[in-house]
Amino acid sequence: MAFFTGSLFCLVCLVATTIAATTTPVTPPYYVITNAETPSLNRPGLTPVGQQRANACIPQIFSQLNIGLILSCSVDKEGKDGLLCPNAVLTATPLAKALGLNITLCATGEGSKDECVPDKLQAFFKTSTKSALIVWDSSEVDDLLEDANVKDAGMDIDDTVETPDVILTVPGLGVRVRPIATSMNCTGIDGPGPA
Ligand SMILES: *[C@@H]1O[C@H](CO)[C@@H](O)[C@H](O)[C@H]1NC(C)=O
Ligand SMILES: *[C@@H]1O[C@H](CO)[C@@H](O)[C@H](O)[C@H]1NC(C)=O
């Protein structure tokens, strides 16, 4: 009987392990975008195109995607890293207002907690079946993706996601499935200009 129970346990273990090892996402997807277009030389705010993206295009896209958490970033304590975080927050604000959500912040830079974003995603997915959106400083996105283990999924995303129109869809938290990059296709501001 002990033997039988033992092997039954093993069978259950084996099945559980097999399921965990396949690529079925265990959480809903989450999305990563960067701050919308900003003026050069660290001048504050968004450009007119960036405002159009933040005010019209982003709310239109993400209000369809069942977003329950918006994560963004704050400048590091020494004021060296995350300088585009205020712009990322500006980018996320119209959507947050439309959805009635607060923007949750994680700090960037040397002294910050690398686990902030993955921890907050994990805590959120524990109690929600909705998706999450990360709106990050474009110059810090590389670190973010490393911290969130997105890079382990085997995609070289360094150059793709630093562009304001790119949406990176990560199929699930801790899932080793390649994230997918798409354009927001915002009317009038993305895609080729007139010939
Ligand atoms: C957002 O934050 C405010 C102030 O802390 C709080 O009163 C409100 O309940 C929060 N809203 C949501 C949706 O969490
Ligand atoms: C943008 O257009 C491409 C090509 O048609 C499509 O694959 C992608 O899903 C679109 N992006 C969004 C956010 O709808």
Image (spheres, rainbow, N blue to C red):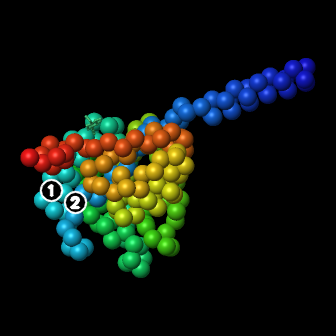
Q: Which mark is residue 37?
A: 2
Q: Which mark is residue 66?
A: none
Q: Amino acid at mark 1?
A: Val
Compared with residue 90, is residue 173 higher up or lower down, i.e. above or below? above
Q: Determine which residue is flagged by label 1.
A: 49
* Left or right: 31 as drawn, with respect to 176: left
Classed neighbour count for the residue bearing mark 1: other residues with Cα under 10 Å, few (<14), some (14–19), many (≥20): some
Residue 89 appears in the rendering: no
* Left or right: 86 as drawn, with respect to 176: left
Q: Position of residue 142 (x, y in %)?
A: 44, 59
The CA span between labels 1 and 2 is 7 Å
SS at badge 1 = helix
Q: Position of residue 184 (x, y in %)?
A: 25, 44
Give the residue displayed 44% in from the left and 42% down from the top.
179
SS at badge 2 = loop
* Quadrant location of the N terminus in the rendered image: top right
- Judging depth in this view, the residue of 181 and 6 nearest the camera is 181
Classed neighbour count for the residue bearing mark 2: other residues with Cα under 10 Å, few (<14), some (14–19), many (≥20): many
* Left or right: 51 as drawn, with respect to 169: left
Compared with residue 150, is residue 35 higher up or lower down, i.e. above or below? below
Q: Position of residue 86 (x, y in %)?
A: 29, 66
Q: Quadrant of residue 5?
A: top right
